Image (tube, rainbow, N blue to C red):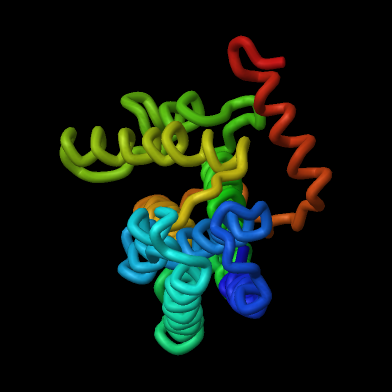
């Protein structure tokens, strides 16, 4: 869900609040409160002070639930919480619109050029799930082609064939550096590529996570170009794939793994 989608959800929820009956046990209120908390959490993160403030709104305190107080007092308590909730939602919209960092016009210069050309549109569109998955797929594809490895080699096997003890494209000078780059490539493949190329992640910090995937992958590609760019075996342009092509390729990768179906 993009920032614009979250803003739209917050505006809708804010508009619904004044028409809710002052009954915290009603299905309409329970649904509204649950949806609002979920949207706020996804937009700002679970630890944000506005999320905490929303979650602590009293609505009807236990004191006000007793029969000693009449409906008027309960309505007043609900109204005060409703006014605070409207303020929280307004503040959340401000954070998303005014305080969010705009796309960096110089971002292309910060990453591997070819990688950015392939996934930069996902950054600008705030498609963080697609950014992570396409970065992972692109990085593995580039390394495989550069090293002239067969399509059947994926993940750990591919990284070991390229960067391992007997790899033709080892990185670094000292044994420790070479081992570090090998483990770095394996880590990208096993801890990140296996996740983002095979399942959809829903997380409040998806932007930060996806940008991290982009940076780590760009680092590996940049180092490969620096040390071995003059001896790559295949530098053909990336062929844009349809969603069906990507799904078919991922199914083939799954079948090549032990226990794959």
- Asked whether, in this view, residue 142 is left or right of residue 217, the answer is right
- Asked whether, in this view, residue 253 is left or right of residue 41, the answer is right
Q: Above or below — where is 96 with respect to 25?
A: below
Counting from the top left corner in percent of width and height, residue 230 is at 46, 56
- Asked whether, in this view, residue 3 is left or right of residue 70, the answer is right
Q: Residue furthest bottom?
A: 98
Q: Above or below — where is 261 with respect to 229?
A: above
In this view, the residue in front, 258 or 142, is 258
Counting from the top left corner in percent of width and height, residue 176 is at 16, 36
Residue lying at 52% horizontally and 67% vertically, measured from the top left: 71
- Asked whether, in this view, residue 125 is left or right of residue 100, the answer is right
Q: Above or below — where is 85 with respect to 112?
A: below
Give the position of the N terminus as an image quadrant.
bottom right
Dividing the picture into quadrants, the one containing residue 69 is bottom left
Residue lying at 35% horizontally and 68% vertically, measured from the top left: 53
Give the position of the C terminus as an image quadrant.
top right
Q: Is residue 5 visible?
A: no
Label count reads 0
Q: Residue furthest top?
A: 259
Q: Is residue 188 visible?
A: yes
In this view, the residue in front, 183 or 75, is 75
In this view, the residue in front, 213 or 223, is 213
Q: Residue furthest front?
A: 68
Counting from the top left corner in percent of width and height, residue 121 is at 63, 71
Residue lying at 73% horizontally and 36% vertically, measured from the top left: 249
Counting from the top left corner in percent of width and height, residue 193 is at 51, 40
Residue lying at 45% horizontally and 89% vertically, measured from the top left: 98
């Amino acid at each position: 869900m993009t920032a614009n989608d979250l803003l739209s959800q917050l505006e809708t929820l804010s508009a619904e609040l004044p028409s809710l009956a002052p009954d915290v046990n009603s299905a309409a209120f329970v649904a509204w409160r649950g949806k609002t908390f979920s949207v706020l959490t996804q937009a700002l993160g679970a630890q944000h002070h506005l999320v905490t403030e929303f979650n602590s709104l009293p609505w009807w305190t236990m004191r006000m639930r007793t029969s000693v107080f009449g409906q008027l007092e309960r309505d007043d308590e609900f109204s005060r919480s409703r006014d605070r909730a409207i303020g929280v939602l307004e503040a959340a919209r401000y954070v998303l619109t005014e305080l969010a960092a705009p796309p960096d016009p110089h971002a292309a210069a910060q990453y591997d050029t070819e990688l950015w050309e392939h996934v930069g549109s996902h950054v600008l569109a705030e498609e963080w799930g697609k950014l992570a998955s396409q970065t992972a797929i692109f990085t593995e594809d580039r390394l495989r082609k550069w090293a002239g490895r067969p399509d059947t080699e994926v993940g750990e096997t591919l990284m070991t064939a390229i960067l391992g003890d007997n790899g033709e494209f080892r990185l670094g000078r000292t044994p420790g550096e070479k081992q570090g780059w090998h483990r770095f490539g394996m880590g990208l493949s096993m801890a990140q590529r296996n996740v983002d190329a095979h399942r959809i992640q829903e997380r409040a910090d998806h932007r930060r996570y996806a940008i991290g995937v982009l940076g780590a992958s760009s680092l590996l590609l940049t180092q490969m170009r620096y040390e071995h760019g003059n001896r790559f075996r295949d530098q053909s342009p990336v062929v844009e794939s349809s969603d069906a092509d990507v799904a078919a390729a991922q199914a083939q990768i799954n079948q090549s793994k032990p226990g794959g179906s």
